[in-house]
Amino acid sequence: MPDDFNRFATPGVGWSDVGASLTRMATAVAGRHHGSPLPYGAPGDMLGAVAAVLGPQRLPDDGIGEDDALTRVAELVAVYGLDLTHRLTAAHLQPPPLTVSVAADALASATNASLDTYDSGPATLAIEKWTIAALARLAGFGPSAGGVFGPGGSFSNLLAMLIARDHAAARLRIDTRHHGVAGLTRPVVFCSRIAHFSINRACATLGLGEAAVVAVDVDEDHRMIPAALDAALASTDGTPVAIVATAGTTDFGTVDPLPEIADIAARHDVWLHVDAAYGFGSLFSDRLAHLVHGIDRADSVTLDLHKIGWQPAAASLLLLRDENLFAALNRNVAYLNPEDDEDAGFGGLLGHTLQTTRRPDVLKVLTTFLAYGRSGLGEMLEACHDVARHAQARIVAEPQLELVASVTLTTVVFRYRCQDLDAVNAELRRRLISSGTALIGRTRVQIAGDAEPSTCLKLTLLNPTATGTDIDELFDELLRHALEVESESTIDGPGYATTEKVRAHE
């Protein structure tokens, strides 16, 4: 093997080779990108096209070389992939990633460090601890706080519910770590009826069962009703494990009344978890920070910087007001973190999570914080908030559109007014996607005066470069497609006006 043949990303020159590979890959696919949020065409056609390029589903006996392999994969992503940087991509809580965070993410991959022990990556361990302390301070927590990065908000919520479960059990002298949950009499977790589904899944995973979840009513603004929570707690005959408040609901971006909920949690002496996967980023903005007032009173907080934070996934974090409560997760393993090594300073964050090997996702987060600071991130959030309010104003001004939920963060929910609401609005979204025009979201909402929940459309606006002009273009196209879909629905009778029917009429 020649001396200059280096297939590994060694520090220094090896990192430079990574950059050169990215440059060659970008040059090879220049001009190949579809130029839309998603490629034009039906999902089956697009998925089939990718499979056809890859060929038979088996590992090749021989490789085609690094450059050709990178080019082939890059071409698939460029021609058939998602473009989060497109200004009409507005469906989900997936932001366009900042260039500096992508570069730092490549550095994280190049180091291949882990956060479990000191000798798996000392620099990255110190960086994670520093970044966690900075975020805990931003949340208003004191010096006893701690946290851990994880693969997503669902995992962070699971971790929070695990710690809350064990905390509630320990107060009853039940050791769930060794004996399981059988001795925990009818555990109960309280959250709003529009809380994230990961709370239900966490309860199922932890042996509490989804039946442990008590769904509390929300008001007309989609915020948990404190009086309803208080009544539910007072009437329960089970063991309260946690109250879960949401700061930034997935559908509406709304924030539960945190101070009132914190008062109730304190009065009933119940663990308070705040799922702020979406809304934590409001703390970057002077204008919007008030939305999460009271978050400092939580026992645990989930945040996702791969939502508001413009990070490549994953960049989720669980914060605890008292770091000592991670203790239930602690493990000492002879080959990894024996106690005498930990006593000598060679420990890590293995005892803070269910993961062992854990990627240093914190590198991109710290780099972004250093590059932009709180004010720079706040300006980006406020730009998204402004565009969301522009979208709201356009909806209100259009007689054919109905505003379903007003803007709190960067989300706006609406529907196209027509006779066949569900069918037309659902197909309208599919038409915008398959035509390559725009990528928007959908949900179902119970609207006052309607007998049943109805299909609604949703914009989740996380691109700070999008403008009011872009939003106006989106609505112009939406209304044009809506008239076509509504007409076709009338021609074909009640039911879904599918893309296949549209093609038949063309």
Image: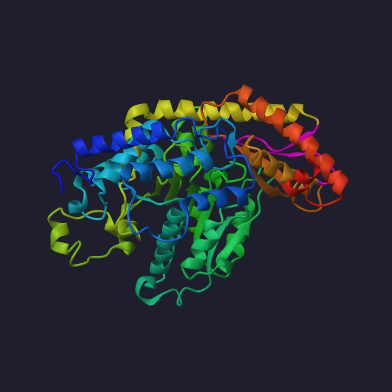
Judge from the rendering whether residue 497 lies leftward or rightward of residue 223; answer left or right: right
Observer-nearest of 317 and 501: 501
Residue 386: image quadrant is top right
Q: Point out the image quarter for the C terminus.
A: top right
Judge from the rendering whether residue 348 lies leftward or rightward of residue 434; answer left or right: left
| Relative height, residue 147 to residue 363 (above, below) | below
Is residue 309 visible to the viewer in this orientation of the structure?
yes
Decide whether residue 409 is among the magenta residues.
yes
Residue 69: image x %, image y %? 37, 46
| Relative height, residue 54 to residue 187 (above, below) | above
Decide whether residue 56 is among the magenta residues.
no
Magenta part of the chain: 400-420
Residue 461: image x %, image y %? 57, 34
Q: How is the image coloured?
A: rainbow
Residue 478: image x %, image y %? 71, 34
Which residue is located at x 59 percent, y 32 percent? 88
